[in-house]
Amino acid sequence: MPTGLTPDTTAPHHRRGPLVVVLVLVAVLVCYFTVPVSSGDAPVRLGVNLAITVLSAAFIVALVVRELAAELRGGGGRLRAPHLVILLELTLLVFALTYYTLAVRSDGQMSGIVTKLDALYYAATTMTTVGYGDIHPTGQLARAVTTLHLGVNVVFVAVVARLVNNRIGVARSDPPRD
């Protein structure tokens, strides 16, 4: 029988949680592959895309840092693991779309990106800091975007590690529930 202290795992919203997360992850991935990006010389479009990338990165970093601040104040954060996974995917796809846009709209910025899957692959290797070298930035703008991506990754990983550490510490200090 659920009490006020324990979550009601029989509630419909709790059982649907993992399914909803998977559906959101798939939907975002489908959107990534279906968003039209045309080639050609369109500096305004490229500028808009870069602005969206910077704003998205700033929003994601602010959200994750806000979560850490709430955790450190002792209030506990609102974001849970599924939210962080979705934020991680959004970060990956925002940068992947930017790399693809740079590749198709700006000659000489990216080497090796021909398809959106190539861009996703490059974003994932950058995010995981694997860097195979087959795809790499060649232009200054692409290098700036890659540097921003690496910075966002460092903040994201550091904050998530701190959140996990804090929550494990809180869980260990909580008295056992009967």
Image (cartoon, rainbow, N blue to C red):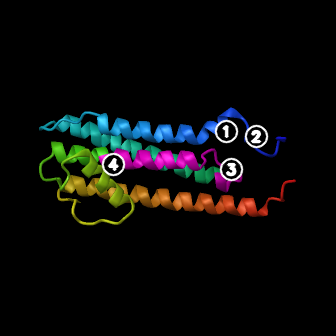
**Separation of marks 2 and 4 at Cα, in angstroms:** 38 Å
Q: Name the residue type under label 2.
A: Asp
Discs 1, 2 touching: Cβ within 8 Å = yes
| Magenta stretch in the rendered image | 71-96
Q: Main secondary structure of the magenta part?
A: helix
The residue nearer to you, when weighing 164 against 49, is 164
The residue tagged 2 is 8
**Separation of marks 4 and 3 at Cα, in angstroms:** 29 Å
The residue tagged 1 is 14
Does 77 lie within the magenta span?
Answer: yes
- Give the percent coordinates (x, y) of residue 154: 44, 61
- The answer to whether 121 appears left or right of 27 in the picture is left
The image quadrant where one finds the N terminus is top right
**Separation of marks 3 and 1 at Cα, in angstroms:** 20 Å
Q: Name the residue type under label 3.
A: Gly
- Give the percent coordinates (x, y) of residue 138: 17, 59
Residue at 32% over, 59% down: 147
The residue tagged 4 is 95
The numbered mark, 4 or 1, whose residue comes first in the sequence reads 1
The residue tagged 3 is 76
The numbered mark, 4 or 3, whose residue comes first in the sequence reads 3
Residue at 22% over, 46% down: 115
**Separation of marks 2 and 3 at Cα, in angstroms:** 19 Å
Residue at 64% over, 50% down: 70
Discs 2, 4 touching: Cβ within 8 Å = no
Depth-wise, is mark 4 or mark 1 nearer the camera? 1
Depth-wise, is mark 2 or mark 3 nearer the camera? 2
Q: Which of the numbered marks, if any, corresponds to residue 155?
A: none
Name the element at disc 4. helix
Name the element at disc 1. helix
The numbered mark, 3 or 1, whose residue comes first in the sequence reads 1
